[in-house]
Amino acid sequence: MTEEILPGKSTGTRSLHPMRAMAKLGYASGAMLDGIATQAINIFLFFYATAVCGLPAALSGVALAAGLVVDAVVDPLIGSLSDGWHSRYGRRLPFMAIGVPGTMLFLSLIFALPIGWSVGALATWLTLSSVGLRVSISLFLLPFNAVGAELSDDYNERSSIAAWRWGFAMAGAVATVILGFGVFLGGPGGLSNRAAYLPFALTLAAMLAISTIFSMRALHAMPERQHPPTRSQDLAHTRLLRELGELFRNRSFVVLFVGALLLFTSSAIQSTLAIHANTYFWHMAPAQVQAVTLALFLGLLCGAPLAGPVLRRLEKRTVLVFGIIGLGSAFSLPPTARLIGLMPQAGDPPVALLAGAVFVGGALMAMAAIAFASMMADAADEHEYLFGARREGLYFASWAFASKAASGFGALIAGFAMQAIGLPSGAVAQGSPVAAVSLTPHIISWIGLIYGPGTGVLALAAALTCLLYRLDASAHRAIISHLAARHRSATNPGNSHTESIA
């Protein structure tokens, strides 16, 4: 069964003016939901569930992984449905409008684990909240990222749109770090103050609501930049299976997908154990943990404006590979140096060194992530060239699938690894200071080994995989040219001229 684009717009031949800065800003503001909700989970949730609320690490890892696995399975369906959805508001906005209130609700619930409940009841609450939150984030974020690939057909302008989007996501992440460590969890009790987590989550929910409203209004004002839905007579599950088959016949997509799986697994292990590593391996106080964490996100934020100039001079693949290596090195080399005796075990923690390393690694990774998002949009053009249909939603859903499946796997690895090395659960459940917890040198070394060289090996594997990507600027120009010729041939049957890609 073939599909066709509904009448009224064309693909590959659109005459679009360059986007105004205000239009990019309006659209990209919605990315704050990603920075706020995702980083609140990644940075604080595992520590909150285990050290503050007393859930065993392995059980917490299973609960968080369950949310990611369910969401990962649902993501391709959301992407496929949004590619073909018909409504007066377009094919993306209805999904985004459902995702925002769901994200607000479940973000609040997941940081409100009841006091006095049994371990099983708490694990159930955490699992259900995790599933609801992850699916709600996807309902907004997948159509949001997909429509960003539609807003321009220009190879370089896509990188600019991705940079704006990344900048807002990192602004949300920085705000989350500052509010978490510096405001709500910076007072008496610090990270062990259980009562502070719900007000923290409610504040984040209000922030993401405001930013997403601006974004949806901006998209509603730009219907001419959005592709129409595809039309198919297939049932949803039949269409989805066929579309997934198409995706995995595209070499460019497969390379990006596998690279993302490896990179996101590395990042998930690192982010899940970050507070544990900074607190117990590096012996940092809460203010020092905040400084290092904030340095990372400031690097991720500062890398966004550098991405445009760099990507105009270098191929996207080059920027992606160097960025992955940079971030992997920032997290793996300092712990490795301490483990092999090149850094002293005693004394004040090397906060300045660690903050500087993650700042540089974060800036490089920001450029890599922007290149990655732009490459996904280019691969979607290649998909239309190969299979004759637009699949932006499914492309970004598959990217999200890789992210969440890998994140779930990474959280599961982290949880079972901490359980296996004997990390005590509920160490600060009664409000005792985190710094007062004493771990054996054996446990501390294992935390550093998993957090540092363990994640570094996975990041290196991701970089090597991405070297196999072959869709560069010249190949993309040829694809756009061919799509234009195909459209002319379709609208003027008497002209059978087409162009091919070497």
Image (cartoon, grey):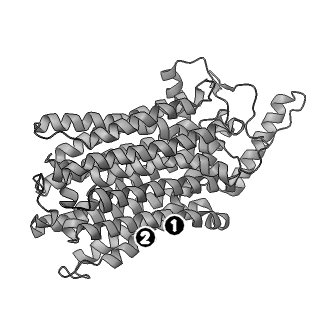
Task: Classify residue 67 by image quadrant.
Answer: top left
Task: Compare marks 1 and 2 and give the one earlier in the sequence.
Answer: 1
The answer to whether the residues at label 1 and label 2 have Cβ atoms under 8 Å apart is yes
Is residue 451 rendered to the left or right of residue 94? Answer: left
SS class of the residue under badge 1? helix
Query: Does residue 330 lie above or below 63 as drawn?
Result: below
Is residue 448 in view? no
Residue 302: which disc?
A: 1
Q: Residue at x 50, y 32 (%)?
A: 97
User: Which residue, given by chain and number where applicable, does mark 2 sit on?
Assistant: 359
Q: Residue at x 25, y 81 (%)?
A: 343
Q: Residue at x 72, y 56 (%)?
A: 474
Q: Amino acid at mark 1?
A: Cys
Is residue 252 rendered to the left or right of residue 189? Answer: right
Q: Amino acid at mark 2?
A: Phe
Q: Nearer the viewer, residue 314 or 140?
A: 140
Query: Does residue 322 lie above or below 88 as drawn?
Result: below
Is residue 85 in view? yes
Label 1: how many residues lie within 10 Å, few (<14), some (14-19) or many (20+)? many
Where residue 245 sits: x, y (%)? 52, 33
Q: Residue at x 79, y 34 (%)?
A: 487
SS class of the residue under badge 2? helix
User: For the residues marked 1 and 2, what is the alpha-carbon distance in whole angstroms?
Assistant: 9 Å
